Image (cartoon, rainbow, N blue to C red):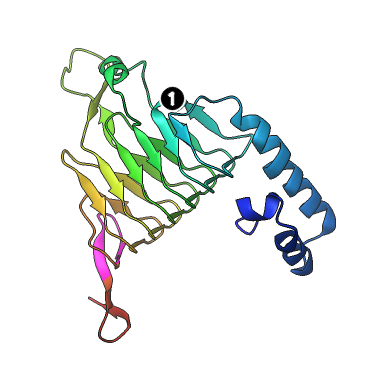
């Protein structure tokens, strides 16, 4: 549950009281605190991150490959069945890099069953909310040689992906670069079931497959305006 944040499962007694008063059954609260607190802390010991901030919670049922090329900021929440993947076995040149390939900023939440897979760079800045079943990838399988099965041709870099701070990436969205750098602007919203292959400007809402702009925030009117 999103309400169980890093802040609540740590030593924040006031936050725990707030959850109890909100109406959740006591046994649910006890289990969530145990699972997202104690078990998540143990789970984080499995990994050797490039860097890791304070109060990071990694659900024990998440999966992380090549953690030494992944950096996590403070108060990051990684929920159940999330897959953070740097496929070193498919791109050996990556081993020469002296930097993180996946960067997750402070206070970002990654929802259940989301996949973030990178061979160049995927950077998710601070305070980003990522929903369920989201896919973010900066590469694809090569299919140049028709005499070989696609699974034997490796993968190719399609350009870095940057998701700026304050964005909301809604459930079932797909963000894939298409041969050049892809940037999601600050404070933007990717609606559910949207496929994004092109840049999104700051404070813009996009929807559909392929994505199209449906609203932008108007600073003069102080509201979102349909396009």
Q: Nearer the viewer, residue 178 or 69?
A: 69
Would residue 144 be found to the left or right of residue 31 on screen? left
Q: Position of residue 181 (x, y in %)?
A: 19, 43
Q: Nearer the viewer, residue 76 or 198?
A: 76
Residue extending farthest bottom: 221
**Res. 97 visible in picture:** yes
Confirm whether the magenta stretch covers residue 208. Answer: yes
Residue depicted at x 17% and y 18%: 146
Residue depicted at x 36% and y 57%: 165
Can you say whether 183 is above or below 90 in the image? below
Quarter in which the C terminus is drawn: bottom left
Characterize the magenta stretch by its predominant secondary structure. Answer: strand
**Res. 5 visible in picture:** no
Quarter of the image where one finds residue 54: top right
- The residue beneath circle 1 is 68
Would residue 180 be found to the left or right of residue 43 on screen? left
Can you say whether 219 is above or below 186 in the image? below
The magenta region covers: 204-214
Q: Position of residue 215 (x, y in %)?
A: 28, 73
Confirm whether the magenta stretch covers residue 195. Answer: no
């Amino acid at each position: 549950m999103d309400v169980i944040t890093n802040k609540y499962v740590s030593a924040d007694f006031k936050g725990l009281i707030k959850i109890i008063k909100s109406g959740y059954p006591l046994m649910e609260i006890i289990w969530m605190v145990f699972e997202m607190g104690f078990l998540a802390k143990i789970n984080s010991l499995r990994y050797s991150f490039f860097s890791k901030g304070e109060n990071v919670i990694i659900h024990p049922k998440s999966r992380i490959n090549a953690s030494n090329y992944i950096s996590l900021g403070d108060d990051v929440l990684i929920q159940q069945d999330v897959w953070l993947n740097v496929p070193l076995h498919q791109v050996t040149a990556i081993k020469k890099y002296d930097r993180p390939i996946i960067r997750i900023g402070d206070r970002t939440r990654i929802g259940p069953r989301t996949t973030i897979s990178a061979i160049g760079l995927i950077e998710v800045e601070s305070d980003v909310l990522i929903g369920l079943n989201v896919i973010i990838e900066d590469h694809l399988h090569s299919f140049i040689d028709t005499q070989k099965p696609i699974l034997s041709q490796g993968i190719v870099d399609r350009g870095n992906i940057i998701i700026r701070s304050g964005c909301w990436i809604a459930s079932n969205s797909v963000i894939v670069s298409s041969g050049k750098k892809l940037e999601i602007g600050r404070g933007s919203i990717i609606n559910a079931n949207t496929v994004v292959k092109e840049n999104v400007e700051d404070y813009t809402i996009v929807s559909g497959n392929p994505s199209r702009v449906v609203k932008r925030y108007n600073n003069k009117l102080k509201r979102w305006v349909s396009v």
